[in-house]
Image (spheres, rainbow, N blue to C red):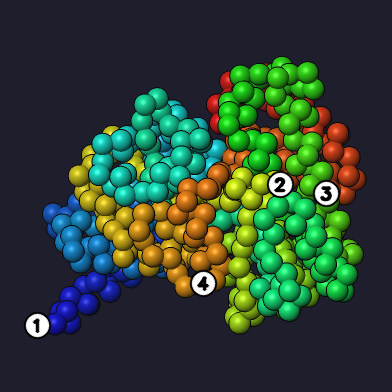
Amino acid sequence: MTDQPIRPAREHRRRARRRRTLAVAASAALGALLLAGCSAPGDGRVQLDFFQFKGEALEDFEQVIADFEAENPDIDVVQNQVADADTIIRTLLVKDKAPDVITLNANGNFGRLAQAGVFYDFSDEPVLQTINPAVQEILADLGNAEGEVNGLGYVNNANGVIYNREIFEEQGLEVPETWDEFIAVCDALRDAGIVPFYGTLADSWTGLPSFNALGAYPAQGDFFEQMREEGEDVGPDSEVSFQQDFAEAMDQQYELFSYTQEGYRGKTYDDGNAAFANGEVAMLMQGIWAINPVKEINPDIDAAIFPYPATDDPDDRLLVSGVDVVVTMGENTPHREEALRFIDYLFEQDVIEQFAASQNMVPSVEGAQLSDDPAIQSVAPWFDEGRITGFIDHQIPPSIPLAAIDQEFLFTGDADAALATLDREWAKVAARTIPVTGE
C-alpha cells in the first residue's frame, strides 16, 4: 500500500490552509483572526488556531503541519501568519480570543505578556526538559508569570561579527579572542588595503547589533533589574545607569566604526550585504540573519561568525543570541491536549532540525544537529557550552528611540550625550509607567 490515496486530501487541506493564510495577510485582518477557530472542520476533527508571526517560515510550517496531521488525523491545524504580530496578539488576548498555539519573537513584548499571566505554564511539561537551559534563561530574563515557565524557545539566532574566512586566511589572521587582538586584526586589514567593516548607518537599526553585543558585557548580572528598581531616579548619580556602566561599551563601538568605509552614513543594510558578498570588506557587524541574503549574492562565500571579544580574558567572551521563535499557548485554550500534542511534535528532534536548517537558525533542543553551514557551525560551541546571553535592547522600553540615539552617537562620537539621553528617556518612561521588561 502506498500513500497515493492520501495525497489528494492532504494537498486539498494544504491549499485550503494557504487560501486562509493569504486572506489574512492580504486584508491585514484582525477581523479574520478574531473569527479564526470559530468554525470547526465539520468532520469531528479538532481545529487548532496556530498563530504564526514569521512570514519566511510560512512554507516550512505548512510542511510541518501537513506531516503532523498525517500522524494525527483527528486534528486540523490552521496556520494564521500575520505581519504585525505584537499588536495583533495583544488585541486577541484582550478580546479573550487567544489562539491555541502561538509563536512570537521573544522580545520585550513577549516578556510583558508572559508576566501578565496570559500564557500556559509549561513548568511540568516534559518537552521543557529537552530544551537547552541557556535558551530558556534568555526567556526567563524577559519575564514569566511568577513561578511559571510561559514559553518554549524554538530556534535561536546569533549576533556576532561575520567574517570572510578566505580573507582572514590570506592575511594570516586568526579569530580574535580579546579586545586588543580584535583591534590588531582591524589594523592589519587596513594596513593591507582591506576595509575591515562595512558601515550601513543609513539604516539606523544596523547600529544596534554591535550595541547589543558590546553592551551585553556591562549588562551582565542584574543590571536591568536594578535599572527598573531605580526607575525615574536613573541618572549619573544613581547606583546603576547607562552613564555609570556603558561608557566603555560605547567607546568600543565608536572605535569599531572608525574602521568602516568612507560614506558609511549613507549606505544601507542591503549595500553592506552586497559589499561583503563581493569581498569588498572583511567583516560585517551583523547577525546570522544576514548570511542568507549574503549567500543569495555569492553562494560560494566562506563566511563564519565570532562573538565580539570585548574583554581581555578569552574565557569571558559571550555570544549574544535571541530566541527568534518562542512557542507558547493560551492559558485557557479549550484544546489543551491537542495543542500540547502539536507542540510536542514541533520539538521532535528531526522536525526542529529540519526547520532550523531551513531558517538558518540554531535549534533549541539539546542534541539536535545543526546544519552544515559554516556560519551555523561556528556558533555551535557557544550554545553547547551555554555561553550565550540575550539582546539588551529587549530590556529597553520600545518607546525609547534607541536606534536613533545610537545612530546619532555614531555620527558625533559624543558618548556622554548619548548615555545621558538614554538615562533621561528611561527615567521618563519609569515616571509614567511601572515597567518590568519595558513599559
Classify 95 as above or below 238.
below
Q: Badge 4 is on which residue?
A: 373
Q: Of label 2 and label 3, which has the lower sequence position?
A: 3
Front position in the image: 423 or 331: 423
Q: Badge 1 is on which residue?
A: 1
Q: Badge 2 is on which residue?
A: 312
Q: Badge 3 is on which residue?
A: 254
Question: Residue 19 shows which numbered tag?
Answer: none
User: What type is the residue that disc 3 sits on?
Assistant: Tyr
Front position in the image: 324 or 224: 224
Q: Residue at x 75, y 35 (%)?
A: 246
For the residue labelled by badge 4, is the local secondary structure a helix, a strand or a loop? loop
Real-space Cα separation, disc 3 to disc 1, in angstroms: 66 Å
Residue 69: name its quadrant: bottom left
User: What type is the residue that disc 2 sits on?
Assistant: Asp
Q: Of label 1 and label 4, which has the lower sequence position?
A: 1
Q: Of label 2 and label 4, which has the lower sequence position?
A: 2
Q: Rate crowding at label 1 as few (under 14), some (14 to 19) or many (20 or more) other CA atoms within 10 Å.
A: few
Q: Rate crowding at label 2 as few (under 14), some (14 to 19) or many (20 or more) other CA atoms within 10 Å.
A: few
Q: In this rendering, does residue 367 appear at all?
A: yes
For the residue labelled by badge 3, is the local secondary structure a helix, a strand or a loop? helix
**Quarter containing the N terminus:** bottom left
For the residue labelled by badge 1, is the local secondary structure a helix, a strand or a loop? loop
Q: Rate crowding at label 4 as few (under 14), some (14 to 19) or many (20 or more) other CA atoms within 10 Å.
A: some
Q: Of label 2 and label 1, which has the lower sequence position?
A: 1
Q: Residue 399 location in percent, x, y?
A: 67, 35
For the residue labelled by badge 2, is the local secondary structure a helix, a strand or a loop? loop
